[in-house]
Amino acid sequence: MQYRRLGRSGLQLSALSLGSWVTFRNQLDTRGAAELMKQAFDAGVNFFDNAEQYAGGESERIMGEALRTLGLRRDSYTVSSKVFWGGKLPTQRGLSRKHIRDAADAALARLQVDYLDLFFCHRPDLDTPIEETVRAMGDLVRQGKVLYWGTSEWEADQIAEAAGIARALGVDPPTMEQPQYNLFVRHKVEREFARLYESLGLGTTIWSPLASGILSGKYAAGIPAGSRMTLPEYQWLRERLESPTGREQVEKAGQLAQLAAELGGTPSQLAIAWCVRNPHVSTVILGASTPAQLAENLAALDLQPRLTSEILVRIEAIVGNAPAPAERF
């Protein structure tokens, strides 16, 4: 396993981590989750990602039970939660001081830990002043309930504003962002955040490296039974797959699969290895529902050295979506 600092912080995260979105509760019970988490931990994974929204809190409860069952030392792993969608009532949503505190306490209880290593603002809240959110996160850090706080799917200017407010208030600024990043979604990580890596030391914990499974190649012949796109609550993913853009991505994924075979790897391994090669990626969050799937994805690091400059040119020729460099005048 490779380990990387979370941005400019001193925290070392495994280059590959394990997330619970979609799988915990929907596809895995506590026993299955514990099995996968042990497999990942034994392979060197030290970061497990979660959120209050995932399965309405059940994902965190299952992860907490799994951590208790495994008996891992608290200083041997990191765990996260995210705050925004905690329920249907007005006080259960958004990034107000109240909901941030309530969400943090609820996550600690469900995960059965005394502190969260990482705590993300799951989306920007346009109805709450950023200063209020920054103050609330600063309070959690000061209280020892959170070690590092960050954002997920925020715009670069929102992150920069939060960091500026934090400096003015003398509290901890955001350390990391959790954006989607894969061969089909690249602009934020490769272009929009470029200045933040240097100015803020921003780290990234990226999600959806397989573009919701499209880059794994499993949708080449349709939607297989048991996949996430057959789940009622993920109908929106199915609609995206069946759109013209989705069909085009499936075609490109087929071409990438041929290239992966040439390199002696699988389509999933190629897509994950491509994400890992970006030095601004602190960790790539993997999603898996079976031990075999997790083992395959973890082996992506073995494929990384084969992504030579020539191979990268061939990949670009297939996807054809590299963000244009910033203009200089």
Image (tube, helix red, strand yellow):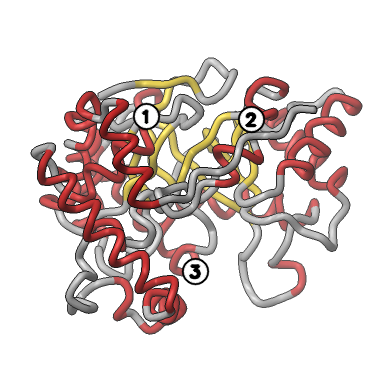
**Residue at the front extreme?**
329
Q: Is there a contact, CB below 8 Å, between mark 1 and mark 3?
A: no
- Residue 299 vs residue 26, the one in the foreground: 299
Q: Tag 3 or tag 2, which sits nearer the N-term? A: 3
Cα distance between the residues tagged 1 and 3: 34 Å
For the point 62% across and 54% down, the residue is 122
Q: Tag 2 or tag 1, which sits nearer the N-term? A: 2
Q: Where is residue 172 in the image (x, y as percent from the top left)?
A: 74, 27
The image quarter containing residue 214 is bottom left
The residue carrying pointer 3 sits among few (fewer than 14), some (14 to 19) or many (20 or more) residues within 10 Å by Cα, namely some
Cα distance between the residues tagged 2 and 3: 26 Å
Cα distance between the residues tagged 1 and 2: 21 Å
- Which residue matches tag 3? 56
Question: What is the three-letter code of the residue carrying label 2?
Answer: Thr
Q: Tell me: residue 328, above or below residue 193.
A: above
- Which residue matches tag 2? 175
Quadrant of the drawing holding the C terminus: top right
**Secondary element at image label 1:** loop
Question: What is the three-letter code of the residue carrying label 1?
Answer: Arg
Quadrant of the drawing holding the N terminus: top left
The residue carrying pointer 1 sits among few (fewer than 14), some (14 to 19) or many (20 or more) residues within 10 Å by Cα, namely some
Front of the two marks 2 and 3: 2
- Which residue matches tag 1? 277
**Secondary element at image label 2:** loop
Question: What is the three-letter code of the residue carrying label 3?
Answer: Gly
Q: Tag 3 or tag 1, which sits nearer the N-term? A: 3
For the point 91% across and 26% down, the residue is 168
Left or right: 196 as drawn, with respect to 219: right
Q: Tell me: residue 211, above or below residue 245.
A: above
Does residue 64 show up? no
